[in-house]
Image (cartoon, rainbow, N blue to C red):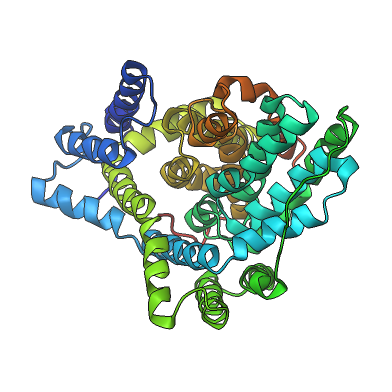
């Protein structure tokens, strides 16, 4: 299959129709998750088969279009990403059942200073989300504690919810097992530690400023009641995953080691039997099935859109407006942000924008590590500020307040936005672009 040499806005019609359908169902029903993403993407794929290619591009038979779609959905890098999603789900399923999650939470609560309750909640949330790799799981685990603190201190519950959501997005962006981070590095062929290094250097000021702001916020001292028991052995699976990822071990064996260590510890502690552990491995994998299937459908859809000239049209349009590397990086950030706002799913936004980001990176000689970091950063901070996204809906529901009321209080996400813009316009941290760090030897999804 040859991609269209001439761009055509018609090639974007499947994606445009998907966004319109998604928005309309959300507006009509009052819930932006009424249209399942998988159903929406399949409808968009059906539309893509009916769109004619631009003039000068060979028309394909229906069978050839199916093969083109399958080629995109079965691209090796994409399938590897799907396998990593499933392994990450298996790890999360086992870790939750053998009490690793509760040990992380209780460890933080047991050492939390009474006079630093607000920054303490934020730091605990950051640690929890970094270990768990899921923003929704962090919010679900920590919001009951945050609500209790709000009641005892008289602090605005919207502020407490904002603290928890901000800390959850910390891990969504930086965790080695976060679907967002996995998608951003896999679509650009980057090692996790390369992206992590750029991310953490960029966001350290945001973390420090947020902690200071929370520390000086007036609140009466409170002592949390209850027993917060934790076990160091239960933390070992998380420690292994973090350390092995930092030293550069391939993510697949890292996930397998994490799962295996969790099973061994769980069996030793009597949390489950060896045979019983398979059920939690399966349930964890099942939790990632939706995102895995959507990823494959998106890969096929993007391949059809390339054939129809949609990707080339976007490149031509951006090329006319973008004259510098700064402009190119900002375009990538803007694209993934807009798709996040439209779909309320930052992982799918990254997977969809990934191929286009690769083309922009290749044209403007960008570093793959910087592009990967851009995708992750811009997709993360906006996700924590969308009132109809799952993160704020869950936080608002548990705090019994409107999600919109939380938006002004998610300070960390605003600080992330500022640091992301500085990352682009100051070109810091700078990465030297070579044939190895750029796109000369890289094949995109």
For residue 319, side relative to residue 130 (left or right):
left
- Residue drawn 68% across the image and 60% down it: 104
Q: Is the residue 58 above or below the residue 19 in the image? A: below
Number of callouts: 0
Left or right: where does residue 56 sit relative to residue 140? Answer: left
Note whether residue 189 is visible.
yes
- Which residue does the image show at 83% across and 56% down from the upper left? 111
Residue 181 or residue 440, whichever sits in front? 181
User: In the image, 84: left or right of 329?
Assistant: left
Q: Nearer the viewer, residue 21 or 260?
A: 260
Q: Nearer the viewer, residue 82 or 307?
A: 82
The quadrant in which residue 405 appears is top right
Quadrant where the C terminus is found in the figure: bottom left
Q: Is residue 436 visible?
A: no
Q: Position of residue 186 (x, y in %)?
A: 49, 58
Q: Name the residue furthest front.
A: 226
- When the figure is inspected, residue 257 is found, relative to residue 427, above or below; the finding is below
**Residue 335 drawn at (x, y percent):** 50, 32
Q: Nearer the viewer, residue 213 or 70?
A: 213
Extreme residue in the top direction: 28
Q: Percent from the top left, x then y, of residue 253? A: 52, 76
Q: Position of residue 322 (x, y in %)?
A: 57, 29
């Amino acid at each position: 299959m040859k991609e269209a040499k001439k761009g055509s806005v018609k090639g974007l019609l499947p994606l445009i129709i998907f966004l319109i359908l998604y928005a309309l169902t959300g507006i009509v029903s009052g819930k932006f998750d009424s249209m399942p993403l998988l159903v929406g993407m399949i409808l968009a794929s059906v539309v893509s088969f009916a769109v004619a290619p631009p003039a000068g591009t060979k028309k394909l038979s229906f069978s050839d279009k199916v093969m083109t779609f399958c080629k995109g959905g079965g691209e090796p890098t994409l399938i590897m990403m799907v396998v990593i999603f499933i392994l990450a789900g298996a790890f999360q399923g086992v870790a939750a059942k053998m009490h690793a999650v509760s040990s992380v939470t209780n460890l933080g609560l047991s050492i939390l200073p009474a006079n630093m309750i607000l920054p303490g909640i934020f730091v605990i949330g950051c640690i929890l989300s970094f270990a768990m790799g899921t923003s929704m799981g962090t919010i679900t685990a920590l919001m009951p504690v945050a609500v209790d603190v709000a009641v005892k201190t008289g602090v605005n519950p919207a502020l407490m919810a904002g603290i928890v959501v901000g800390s959850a997005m910390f891990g969504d962006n930086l965790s080695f097992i976060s679907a967002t981070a996995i998608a951003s590095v896999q679509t650009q062929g980057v090692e996790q530690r390369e992206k992590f290094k750029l991310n953490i250097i960029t966001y350290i000021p945001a973390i420090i400023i947020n902690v200071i702001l929370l520390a000086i916020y007036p609140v009466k001292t409170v002592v949390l009641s209850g027993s917060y028991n934790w076990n160091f052995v239960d933390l070992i699976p998380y420690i292994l995953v973090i350390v092995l990822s930092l030293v550069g071990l391939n993510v697949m064996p890292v996930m397998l080691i994490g799962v295996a260590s969790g099973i061994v510890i769980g069996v030793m502690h009597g949390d489950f039997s060896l045979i019983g552990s398979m059920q939690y491995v399966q349930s964890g994998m099942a939790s990632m099935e939706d995102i895995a299937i959507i990823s494959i459908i998106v890969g096929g859809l993007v391949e059809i859109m390339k054939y129809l000239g949609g990707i080339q049209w976007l490149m031509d349009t951006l090329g006319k407006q973008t004259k510098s590397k700064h402009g190119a990086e900002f375009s990538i950030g803007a694209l993934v942000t807009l798709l996040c706002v439209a779909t309320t799913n930052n992982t799918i936004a990254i997977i969809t924008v990934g191929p286009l980001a690769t083309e922009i990176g290749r044209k403007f000689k960008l570093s793959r590590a910087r592009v990967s970091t851009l995708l992750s950063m811009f997709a993360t901070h906006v996700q924590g500020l969308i009132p109809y996204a799952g993160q704020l809906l869950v936080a608002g529901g548990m705090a019994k307040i409107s999600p919109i009321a939380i938006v002004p209080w998610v300070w960390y996400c605003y600080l992330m936005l500022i640091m992301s813009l500085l990352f682009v316009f100051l070109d810091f941290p700078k990465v030297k672009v070579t044939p190895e760090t750029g796109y000369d030897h890289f094949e995109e999804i």
